[in-house]
Amino acid sequence: MNKNQSLPWDHPRFRSWIAVARACQLMQQSLARALAHLDIKPPHLDILVNLFRFEGISQQELARKLLVGRSNMSMLLPQMEKRGLIERRGDKQDKRVLRLYLTAAGRQVTEEAMTIQTALIDRMMSHAPVEECEIMTAHMERVVTLLMQDEREPLEAVGDQ
């Protein structure tokens, strides 16, 4: 980088990206503290909420929704099953597939955790008008779409352009 080139942090897009990343990191930390008394962490909550919404989802579908590998699932799910929060059942049509369900205890923890998460989000976003939230949502959904496309079709190396 020569002296005439501007530095990345001088660009509004770069600063915006860093601000979003920092906000996500700090929100995860705040959420982890708020959930600690339930003995769950944000990754557990992600699983619980998805099972709450999509009862009977397969492990593979859940990993895809959460954008994580199956190895992550195979670490978290047994812990949650041992705690009595979830149960895995074989699929009636395809014996190779395991379907995931919340237990009664899992449903109770999920509902309490969702209340905590919603309150935290409401507190953090209370100063933002709904219209601004919708604009931010549209921008972030566009970024997600682009990143998912890049995941499927990696960009050429910068030097190749």
Image (cartoon, rainbow, N blue to C red):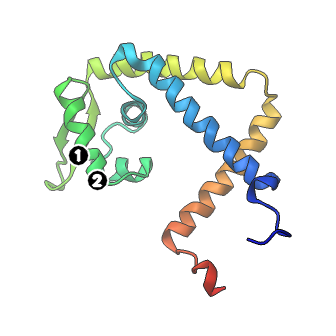
Would you identify the image quadrant in which residue 19 lies?
top right
The image shows residue 27, relative to residue 10, as above or below, that is above
Q: CA gap, disc 1 to disc 2?
A: 6 Å
Residue 32 vs residue 45, the one in the foreground = 32
Judge the density around disc 2: few (<14), some (14-19), many (≥20) Cα neighbours within 10 Å.
Answer: some
Residue 70, label in figure: 2
Question: Which residue is at the far left?
Answer: 95
Question: Which residue is at the far front?
Answer: 3
Residue at image location 63% in from the left, 35% down from the top: 23
Residue at image location 65% in from the left, 56% down from the top: 143
* Drawn side of residue 84 relative to residue 146, left or right: left
* Drawn side of residue 23 relative to residue 75, left or right: right
Quickly name the residue at label 1: 74
Residue 101 in picture, x, y percent from top left: 27, 33
Could you tell me which secondary element the residue under label 1 belongs to?
helix
Would you identify the image quadrant in which residue 50 lies?
top left
Residue at image location 69% in from the left, 50% down from the top: 17
The kind of residue on which mark 2 rests is: Arg
Residue 92 vs residue 160, the one in the foreground = 160
Could you tell me which secondary element the residue under label 2 belongs to?
helix
Would you identify the image quadrant in which residue 133 lies?
top right
Verify CB contact (< 8 Å) between mark 1 and mark 2. yes
Residue 147 in picture, x, y percent from top left: 58, 61
* Drawn side of residue 60 relative to residue 97, left or right: right
* Drawn side of residue 154 relative to residue 82, left or right: right
